[in-house]
Image (cartoon, rainbow, N blue to C red):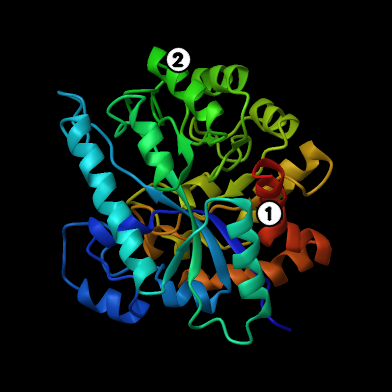
Amino acid sequence: MNNRLIIDAHLDLAMNAIEWNRDLSRPIDEIRQRELFKPDKPDRGNGTVCLPELRKGNIGLVVATQLSRVAPLGSGLPGWHSPQQAWAMTQAQRVWYQEMEKQGELRLIHNLAGLEAHLKLWEEAEDTNDLPIGYILSLEGADSLVDVDYLQEAYSYGLRALGLSHFGPGRYAPGTKKTGPLDAKAYDLMREMSQLNMILDVTHLTDEGFDEALDFYDGPIWASHHNVRKIVPNQRQLTDAQIKRLIERDAVIGGMLDCWAMDVRFIDTVSDPWQLDIKLEMLVDHWDHICQLAGNAKHIGIGSDLDGIFGTEQSPWDLDTIADLQKFDAILKKKGYSDADIDAVFHGNWLRFLRKNWK
């Protein structure tokens, strides 16, 4: 049987290409080989994502990010010292995506007609090895938008989804490991997003910011890469109340494969996935929990976040590359999921969401 089509709703492709200096058009073994004995990043030599591996795993559509944060004076956090610098970095990332389009590696998907044409291309192809991978452009954290007027320019070049925050303090909203409400600028930004029918990604928001965003924003909402707080207690995870609110909004929640978000025992930079026996199937516990709250499997999907500043050292031990997402087929069957539900998790739920909101 042919592999099912997969949509992965969160990959930091351009960050890896520009800041990690990874040529994602090359084989994964070559990328890893180039990074041997480089100590500058914790995941050197451990990458899991490249364009050939996406094709190998029949991952024909991804949500790909621009990511560039501003670090406030005295915060001690990595990041740019001004919004203008952060904006410039996102533009370098945008140009990389465009260069990959010119090479036939990627295809920007920004409306329903383009989505349907791309799906038809992948469905009818006998061999996907030379097909472009579709990508929907998302901005992870709004720090780089110098002011709200910049959103219109970003939309014009294809940005269709946006998260207000990332880690730590943010210009529009505080994020992971912080508390507190949205900044006043966030409301102006969401008003403009609503006019453009952009997708609001609630990932990384504080609990206060999450509630305020859902109360205020009347456009489409998703959680691109989020797991369950009841299983792994952490502010970065979704509470049952938050999950129920997302279900009420017909949102889809992408399960992520960073080990700390899957298993409460895992400690960043300390634990070993092999020693703790952290496997892909552990993500299904998070999906099951969401399904129980929803009463169906219509609100879960994949948002792997693979190579999101971590690699195999912080991924399930039975995943070598992103192509191994196909292993979820057998895992979900073993857990009792029907063929229709597996299709929904792999791609159907994200497609339903996009078709509904891009009509």
- Using the image as rendered, state which of residue 69 and residue 193 is in the foreground: 193
Nearer the observer: mark 1 or 2; the answer is: 1
**In the image, is residue 242 above or below residue 105?**
above
Q: Amino acid at mark 1?
A: Leu
Q: For residue 282, what is the image quadrant? A: bottom right
Residue at mark 2: 181
Q: In the rendered view of the protein, which quadrant contains the N terminus?
A: bottom right
Mark 1 residue crowding within 10 angstroms, few (<14) / some (14–19) / many (20+): some
> Residue at (47%, 52%) from the top-left corner?
258
Instruction: Mark yes or no: residue 285 visible.
Output: no
**Mark 1 to mark 2 CA distance (whole Å):** 32 Å
The percent position of residue 304, horizontal first and vertical second, equals 52, 55
**In the image, is residue 56 above or below residue 168?**
below
Q: For residue 90, what is the image quadrant? A: top left
Q: Amino acid at mark 2?
A: Pro
- Using the image as rendered, state which of residue 336 and residue 168 is in the foreground: 168
Q: In the rendered view of the protein, which quadrant contains the C terminus?
A: top right
The percent position of residue 44, horizontal first and vertical second, equals 26, 64
> Residue at (25%, 78%) from the top-left corner?
33
> Residue at (51%, 76%) from the top-left corner?
55
The percent position of residue 125, horizontal first and vertical second, equals 63, 82
Residue at mark 1: 351
- Name the outermost residue toward the bottom: 126
Ranked by sequence position, the earlier of labels 1 and 2 is 2
- Using the image as rendered, state which of residue 288 and residue 141 is in the foreground: 141
**In the image, is residue 41 above or below residue 327?**
above
The percent position of residue 131, horizontal first and vertical second, equals 51, 77
Instruction: Mark yes or no: residue 293 visible.
Output: yes
Q: Are marks 1 and 2 in contact (CB under 8 Å)?
A: no
